[in-house]
Amino acid sequence: MAGRGFADRFTKFPVTASEAPAPGISTFQAPASDAVNPPVDSSSEVEVTQFPVWLYPPSQWENIDLISYALLPAIGATVTILSFQVPLGRNGVIKAIANNFVGGGWVEGTGDVIWKLLVDGASPPNANSYGSIPASLGSPANPVAIPGFRVWENQVITFVGFNNPAGPDVGVVVAGQRLGARIIGYLYPRDSEDSDVWV
């Protein structure tokens, strides 16, 4: 083999099995299958059956995506922009929200108009930041992701707007403006919850 030419040594055809390797060239020996894939001790395996349902939707999830607009109410009054009741046998998670103002006479962030995202008429548990929203959180066309909060069967989720007389301009004079809101999340069967889930 030492006398083979370049074309012979670098041919696309393999060397026949009967030919010995050139001096100084070692051949590859495949390790035993046990060395590559050693047997696994089944007693040490951890079985993961499902991710927490409040972090990832389970297989039987259902979408929540609600959007609505309402006319700006009179100064000192509140309007329900959208409302949703969690169905029996379902729990869920709200993962993104949006609210906006359409029309004139309002300055972003002043507090002359306040949005409130409520669960059963109060701020969502552990999500008190949404009980008084003085500015647009994205828009219904481009909602913002939030850390999320959980909702339970029969709870009523409402997004309301308040024309605030305590704002710097004592509210917004009504002239056909509209308030928008959107909530996005998912529902799942209540029995997907662990029996010892912490709320």
Image (cartoon, rainbow, N blue to C red):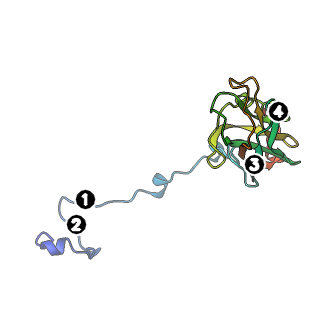
Mark 1: few/some/many CA within 10 Å (<14, 14-19, 20+): few
- The quarter of the displayed image where residue 86 is located: top right
Q: Quadrant of the N terminus?
A: bottom left
Of badges 2 and 3, nearer the viewer stands 3
Q: Nearer the viewer, residue 38 or 9?
A: 9
Of badges 2 and 4, nearer the viewer stands 4
Indicate which disc, 1 or 3, sits on the residue closer to the N terminus. 1
Indicate which disc, 2 or 4, sits on the residue closer to the N terminus. 2
The image's mark for residue 68 is: 3
Residue at the location (35% across, 59% down)?
29
In percent of width and height, residue 41 lies at 60, 46
Indicate which disc, 1 or 4, sits on the residue closer to the N terminus. 1
Amino acid marked by disc 3: Ser
Left or right: where 78 falls relative to 44: right
The image's mark for residue 21 is: 2
Mark 2: few/some/many CA within 10 Å (<14, 14-19, 20+): few
The image's mark for residue 77 is: 4
Residue indicated by mark 1: 26
In percent of width and height, residue 44 lies at 63, 42
Residue at the location (85% across, 33% down)?
121
- Work out whether 149 lies above or below 86: above
